[in-house]
Image: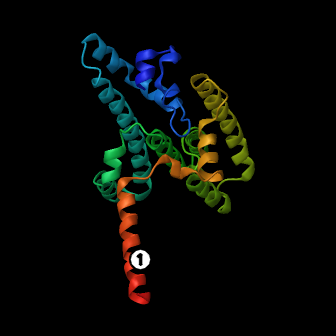
Amino acid sequence: MHDILYHGFNLTEYDHHEFPGVVPRSFLGPIVVSGMASPLMAGINYLEFNKFCAQYAVRAALGLLVIATFKLYRHAVQNIFGLQFTKWFVAITVTQYHFMYYLSRPLPNIMAMPLVLLALFGWWRKNYVIFIWSSAAAIIIFRAELAILLGLFLLFDIASQKLSVQRLFKIAVPAGILFLALTVATDSIFWGRLVWPEGEVFYFNTILNKSSEWGVSFSDIISLSFKKERLFSILNGYFG
């Protein structure tokens, strides 16, 4: 997002060429968030504030996007379960560590969150156009494994005859083609090669089983070492 806001169409200055990461990620989310933050950025640049303020601008834009879609989801829940249930639902959600901590962090998971919330809003409202199109965008552009979660919603509605397979394909096929074409066309320009970022992520993590190359946290290493020591002490007790 820094490069989009400060380098614009000068793609040679983008730092992902030098620091590409383990797998490519889509630029579509950062483009949308940067576009939302651009009015704030205009003020920041005009007033000559420190560039670090740009991070607050983009995180505010992403956070507001998550909150806006969460509000839609809350309304859908309230229409079905009532106000009292919804108050408890919101109270429990906003007092949990992960939601409040992550809702403005520029990660692929959080880029997908507004789409997932919008999809669930559509599912509660039985609006399958919103549900399927939002799900398709989230799965194809940001997180392929969401197909497991959101696919279960579809299977449930098909099994309960709320949604026919024919209507599913009628909605899903155009959505899938559009979002796949959009991410391939856009990201191929930014990455300088023909690429479907989330397709490569899925292949890397699932088919090649190389997710460990993302790295291992220090706490995981410490935890593993303690487990090994515990195992050796138990074995010594039996065979020592």
Quadrant position of the N terminus in the picture:
top left
Quadrant position of the C terminus in the picture:
bottom left
Q: Position of residue 217 (x, y in %)?
A: 39, 53
Residue pictured at 40% horizontal, 47% vertical: 75
Q: Is residue 115 above or below residue 223?
A: above
In depth, the one of 193 and 64 nearer the eye is: 193
Q: Is residue 42 above or below residue 151?
A: above
In depth, the one of 38 and 52 nearer the eye is: 52
Residue pictured at 64% horizontal, 30% vertical: 184
In depth, the one of 74 and 180 nearer the eye is: 180
Q: Look at the numbered disc 1 and give the secondary structure of its residue.
A: helix
Q: Amino acid at mark 1?
A: Leu
Is 104 placed left or right of 19 in the picture? Answer: left
User: How many residues crowd around disc 1 within 10 Å: few (fewer than 14), some, or many (20 or more)?
Assistant: few
Q: Colour scheme used in the picture? A: rainbow
Q: Position of residue 78 (x, y in %)?
A: 39, 52
Q: Name the residue furthest right.
A: 166
In depth, the one of 120 and 214 nearer the eye is: 214
Residue pictured at 64% horizontal, 51% vertical: 208
Give the number of callouts: 1
Q: Position of residue 56 (x, y in %)?
A: 30, 29
Is 137 placed left or right of 72 in the picture? Answer: right
Q: Name the residue furthest top.
A: 46
Q: Which residue is mark 1?
A: 231
Q: Position of residue 8 (x, y in %)?
A: 47, 15
Residue pictured at 37% horizontal, 76% vertical: 230
**Picture quadrant of residue 239:** bottom left
